[in-house]
Amino acid sequence: MSKPEIIITPDKMCLLASSWRSDRLKIALVPTMGFLHEGHLSLIKKARETANRIIVSIFVNPLQFGPNEDFDSYPRNIERDIFQLSKYGVDAAFIPTIQNFYSPNFSTSVDVNDLTQGLCGTDRPGHFKGVTTVVTKLFNTCSPHVAVFGQKDFQQAMVIKRMTRDLNWNIDIKIAPTVREHDGLAMSSRNANLTTLERSNAPKLYKGLCKGQTEITNGVRSAKKIQQIIYCFIKENLTEQIEYVEVIDKETLERIDTISRPIVIAAAVRLSKTRLIDNIILSPSNLSTS
């Protein structure tokens, strides 16, 4: 078990990445906000499949948090994170400070239109601009050939894929499957902020999505009906604080009327101060035609 090289400054990270590229080594980046769990570690495993050097960034990015969101209470434990990275053979941990990653007069942003509308973009204005801006800085600093993101944040992953394409970066964006707890709850750093009662109820978000999936498998093709079924289940069994329940096209993230092509069923809720999101992807191979 070897400890990753800990890098604090962007300049040093740029130099290390440049030296690896000069040696013709393939670099994979796994961007995180820390408080690592098995979901993050699955991204590292996927990165290892295609690269010689792995960089994991740990940075709680203030630009993607709204004024009343949980930036200050977002769980953090850098020592524990570094220990976890050591077990998985990560080569470098890039852990910049806000001060050295964003200059005092920082005034540049990157914005992706269309895909950032709806879903999480509706209730979190400016969130995706913060995400795309920080990911742009991470790409420029770490110079990866591959970057790995999780399916749980599916809209985010698709936004980053679009940004990468539009800006002509030669970076392969990979999306790894959601990793779940034994009871189905999607792993998330924010789960640490759930109360005991909230944690016991939280898996009902995924159960609601699965209920919608079952209805589709049984032949229901009305997106509106599926949304209503899931919405009612979540409202009756989990919480009335529902931000959205949507059935959308997998590629465009647009709402659809009839389910006949690859889709994503997605939902977001709030349990007191903790926001949970989850989704299920359905493709033609698991859409019943009966």
Image (cartoon, rainbow, N blue to C red):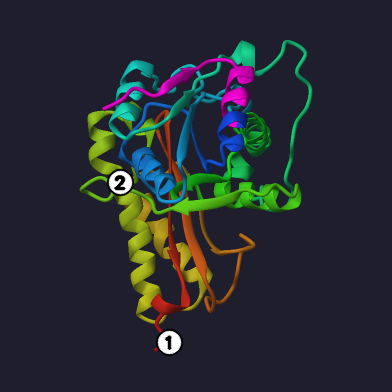
Name above or below for residue 111 compared with residue 35.
Answer: below
Of 84 and 253, the residue lying toward us:
84
Amino acid type indicated by mark 1? Thr
Report x, y in % for residue 287. 42, 78
Q: Quadrant of residue 87?
A: top left
Q: Residues within 10 Å of mark 2 (few under 14, many from 20)?
A: many
**Quarter containing the N terminus:** top left
Q: Which residue is mark 2?
A: 185
Q: Marks 1 and 2, Cα distance to the nearest angstrom?
A: 29 Å
Residue at position x 37%, y 52% from top? 234
Report x, y in % for residue 267. 46, 52
Name above or below for residue 106 compared with residue 156.
Answer: above
54 on left or right of 234: right
Q: Residue furthest front?
A: 23
Report x, y in % for residue 56. 46, 31
Name above or below for residue 69 compared with residue 139.
Answer: above
In magenta stretch: residue 91:
no
Residue at position x 42%, y 78% from top? 285
Q: Which residue is mark 1?
A: 289
**Quarter containing the C terminus:** bottom left
The residue segment tinted magenta is 1-17
Which element type, helix, strand or loop, lies under badge 1?
A: loop
